[in-house]
Amino acid sequence: MSAITAIKRAQDICDLAPGYIRAIAPYEPGKPIAELARELGLDPNSIIKLASNENPLGVSPLAMQAMQQALADIARYPDGNGFELKHALSRRYAVDASQIVLGNGSNDVLELAARAFLTPGVEAIYSQHAFAVYPLVTQAAGAAGIEVPARDFAHDLEAMLQAITLRTRLAFLANPNNPTGTLMRSADLLAFLLAVPPSVVVVLDEAYNEYLPDDLKADSIGWLTEFPNLIITRTFSKAYGLAGLRVGYAFAHAGVADLMNRVRQPFNVNSVSLAAATAGLDDREFVRRGFELNQSGMRRITQGLAQLGLTYIPSFGNFVSFKVMDAAGVFQRLLKHGVIVRPIASYGMPDYLRVSIGLESENERFLEALRQSLFA
Ligand SMILES: *Cc1c(COP(=O)(O)O)cnc(C)c1O
């Protein structure tokens, strides 16, 4: 049978897509406020969303101003090379602009790493309970995803090393990890990089880096000179409060950055986002306030969880996952109180819920709603 005949005989056009595409389980985002408002007939203003690790302070005023100015020019294509933002990142982090890849969120740069290095027949490794995007981008590239069992919800770097084969091209590490909030020690990460074969690209996802106290931040950028197989990814979605705009970036060896830039869309970051991120990067005061709010909010929420007799996984991000009987039921009852958190059954954690640290008032409302939902 000719290929044309085979195509004509296909029952369903979707059967023609590769099996690995048809098998992709879609990403489950946090429930939007507007959706819950529609479903329960609630006033959107009465709902609090602590489900997507967004910034409770909103947007940096400097970024807001830059966005408004950029709007005047949206008839023009953006700068496809992101000169200004790369220049600002280059100055801040002392990396050459040729080592930077910009993305439509760091999700995009994670996908660019997968597209640059993965094909059917090769493998990517990542930890159990790690960020859901790693298996997604691996599968979309047709590669095999190897999930390595976690240890106490944290990446087991020893086991990850053991999982490397001749087919391994990428290893994804999240530090801190989402949804567990666990952090790898800098010395352990460095030992991992030294032990990994140079033919394996290590993607170190530091989406929550800005929420770490300085003494816990790894000198990951400093490692780039020594490890041409290292890609560091970061984002403007969390500490910079620009989740809706979608801006992320990677630092890598210039050759690796060049490959990633070849597979991206020519204008993958829009002009408003470029302007906002460039201005937001300079708003150190905004990031500092967010850091401090997160520290005190984390103390309050974990203390409140403990008072309710709940166990939680100590977290280094802007969220914390806690264990609860009937997590699905508690999630639903919290929704009725207008509080959206995140069920994480799809991360292999059906007995846990994840809550993002909010404003003081939001944290209090969450704890009170949780108290009522537990003993309902
Ligand atoms: C939120 C998050 C990201 C960032 O996603 P964006 O696409 O930049 O919004 C990346 N990695 C992890 C682990 C995250 O939790």
Image: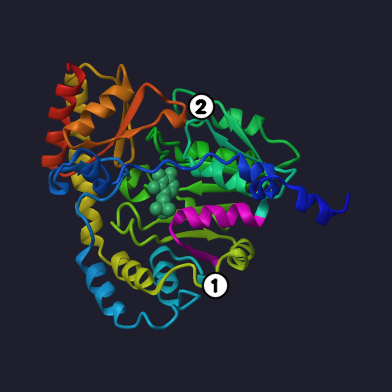
Looking at the image, tell me whether mark 1 or mark 2 is earlier in sequence order: 2
Residue nearest the viewer, comparing 1 with 122: 1
Quarter of the rendering containing residue 346: top left
Residue 322 lies in the magenta-colored region: no
Residue type (three-letter) at the residue carrying disc 1? Pro
Classed neighbour count for the residue bearing mark 1: other residues with Cα under 10 Å, few (<14), some (14–19), many (≥20): few
**Horizontal and vertical percent position of residue 69:** 26, 79
Identify the residue at horizontal 61%, vertical 51% (top origin).
114
Quarter of the rendering containing residue 306: top left
Residue type (three-letter) at the residue carrying disc 2? Ala
Identify the residue at horizontal 76%, vertical 52% (top origin).
7
Residue nearest the viewer, comparing 291 with 347: 347
- Mark 2 sits on what residue? 150
Classed neighbour count for the residue bearing mark 2: other residues with Cα under 10 Å, few (<14), some (14–19), many (≥20): some
Q: Nearer the viewer, mark 1 or mark 2?
A: 1
Identify the residue at horizontal 46%, vertical 60% (top origin).
249
Magenta span of residues: 99-116
Residue nearest the viewer, comparing 46 with 104: 46
Disc number at residue 266?
Answer: 1
Q: How many marks?
A: 2
Secondary structure state at the residue bearing disc 2: loop
